[in-house]
Amino acid sequence: MTALPEKTHVVKEFAHTSPLIACRFDPSGRYVFASAEDGTVRRWEMGTSKTGALAGHESWVFALALHPVGEVIITGGGDGQLIWWPASAEEPKPLRRIAAHQGWVRAVAVSPDGSIVASCGNDRVIRLWSFAEGTPLLELAGHEKPVYRLLFTPSGRTLISADLRGLVIEWDYRPGKEARRLDAGKLYQYNGGQGVDYGGVRDISLSRDLKYLACGGLIEASNPLGAVSNPAVVIFDWQTGQETRLLRPREDIKGVVWGLRFHPAGFLIAASGGTAGGFLWFWKPDQVNEFFKLVLPNTARHLDLHPDGDRIATAHHDGKLRVSLMAP
Amino acid sequence: MGLGLASGFSGMVQPAVSAELERRQRQVLLVWLAGGASQLETWDPKPRTDTGGPFRAIETSVPGVRISELLPLTAKQMHRMALVRCVNTKEDDHGKGYYLMHTGRREAPGQEYPHLGSLSAKYLTSEQNPLPGYIHIQPGGGGLSGHEAAFLGPKYGSLVLGNGLAPANTVRAGSLGDAGASEREALRHHLNDRFARRRRTAETDAYTTTYEQALQLMERRHVFDVTKEPARDLDRYGTHDFGRHCLLARRLLESGVTFVKVTHSNYDTHNENFDFHLEQVGELDQSFSALLDDLARSGRLQHTLVIIMSEFGRTPRINQLYGRDHWSAAWSIALAGAGIKPGVVVGRTNANGTAVADGQVHSGHLFHTYLHALGLDPSDTFEANGRAIQVADPSASPIKELLG
């Protein structure tokens, strides 16, 4: 089916009793997973709405990553742990636990060939692990602020990381070296009056044709403690590393881009949340303002794109996992 | 005195401890967490509850007492501290909460009460002490804040060191030599005395005091220069502003300043409470634990009352922005030092922190407790505008479990 983003509407809701944080489809598209403020990860079967729960962290789960063949989900929590789980088991129990980081794990990614797991967090380092054995392989140090996001490039040769200060590093990770740095510092500010760091790269996505890297977050944070900021996306030409565009809403709508995905057709989908509520944004990477937006019933905290390219999952504070369809 | 005030309070120092006070000067360190720090991310964590948030609780040096994992260094100092986990101040407004926590009373039309710092400056500071009795280190601007002294008179207000910098204009102009400075000072005294004989007021007293303090400060400007502290201490306290300010607080206490307040800003985390507390409490933990440890090791903690507080706590409920809002119904403060029993936890909140379950106290109880710990009698009275006013709210009493 050809996605029709201008026709996007909510088609399904899965409900949980606790606010949701992050969400992820499995590679087959059979399941959608969402972490919640009660420390669990919920699993819903898309077709039947049958539920499951992954309970094992001593804190909130901020990071979800699925192995490419979909049999294992790896979760990363505020307890610094990585946990391997059987993704489709009737009652999932941890297969492996790793004390991976000091403080929160913020992101987990699995390499395209499924052999390597990468994790990052508040301790400012990136660690690589053997997927099969769970053994440590390498540590990458270079960020000076908490590292928020990780993404393997499709070739699997390099890994992209992004942090609170807006620093983006592409790592040639097998020798453990930085390949290059990009600056998304527009998404960061230090507010001297309030004495706080704020912003950062809240999500990243590479376009399927490797032409663009998108970094989502916020700009114009006049009052970080009061959530006065505007959602924004910095677009880089991935080949040259040059920033090409700053995407922002046409209207003055407050919030933060918490999740974004390039669609295979080349447009960008972002979810924002904040004082103005929840939105899905649809941008073309070479145009500043959106070509469509969908107002969601509740503030959005993350999103993922279904493997079929037609459905979008969004995680919400009201405990709902909403599925939106890009079709009439 | 001018303004129709006749501040009395002469009997305030309890006879039983006055001898002790003569031998050893009581001091106060107030760490003010501006904006309202979250009790759940500091002194009263509720992990794995619907209100607990993502942080865990950790053991401390007092068996059975657990605090937020954001305070690992402070946890090692808990045997020197006491926690009050049952504060209900019923005041969710920043300004009113600030006043309440500094004075132990609610704001009332037509009546201002002195802040604890001003009381300390007046009643614990020797007249011979060349330094101000009340110094406040804060981010932002500096100057003098006389209104905090209320009817005690503006000279007991705070000297505010903006950004931890020495008071402005405390370097004598290079063109003025010693002889010229002495002659100028003699002329000022002469004119001042003549004026005071006819029109003396609290303001003229404050002016005179301020001027003389300024001269003394000029001679002691080095007291404010934190760069004179060893580099290893600068590292230990933290290279951030709060670290530098805490090290300056140590330097001021060691120099004999009676009341030192350090403000750490900002905890008003309606948005992204957890990320902001991660950063702010991380700074607090490093700097405060180093300062408390130094006070203890030097022996100074025995006669220094340490208070960590805010204008209120933060809501157990986590809002849609990952924030916590204003909450005064069930929150915590921490104490240490002079007159405070170490290792004590007073009161408790319910399972998810939404209400005080045992031992509820308000700011009046806390204020009584501070005064007792400092050897001052909360039941003594001021005379202000012809009225006798009890020093601390007469409806409250000290928290006996905290007092040694």
Image (spheres, coloured by chain):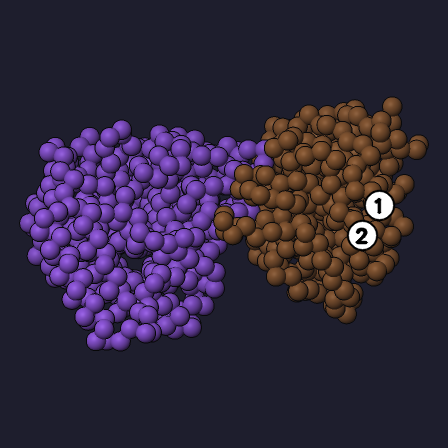
On residue A244, which mark appears? 2
Crowdedness of circle 1 by 10 Å Cα count: few (<14), some, many (20+)? few
- Can residue A54 be seen in the rendering of this structure? no
Q: Residue at x 23, y 71 (%)?
A: B181
Chain letter behind tag 1: A
On residue A327, which mark appears? none
Give, as a three-letter code, the residue at label 2: Thr
Q: CA distance from mark 1 to mark 2?
A: 8 Å
Cβ–Cβ under 8 Å for marks 1 and 2? yes
Residue B225's spot in the image, x, y percent?
36, 68
Chain ID, purple in image = B
In the displayed structure image, the side of residue B290 where residue A239 appears, left or right:
right
Give, as a three-letter code, the residue at label 1: Asp
Residue B103's spot in the image, x, y percent?
26, 40
In the displayed structure image, the side of residue A324 where residue A145 appears, left or right:
left
Q: Residue at x 12, y 32 (%)?
A: B387
Q: Residue at x 32, y 65 (%)?
A: B170
Crowdedness of circle 2 by 10 Å Cα count: few (<14), some, many (20+)? some
Q: Colour of chain A?
A: brown
Which quarter shows the N terminus of chain B? top left
Q: Quadrant of residue A166?
A: bottom right
Q: Quadrant of residue B228?
A: bottom left
Pick whichever, B178 or A115, lies toward us: B178
Position of residue B253 relative to residue B99, above or below, is: below
Chain letter behind tag 2: A
Residue B273's spot in the image, x, y percent?
53, 42
Q: Residue at x 43, y 60 (%)?
A: B243
User: Which residue lies under the disc numbered 1?
Assistant: A286
- Element under disc 1: loop
* Count of numbered labels shown in the rendering: 2
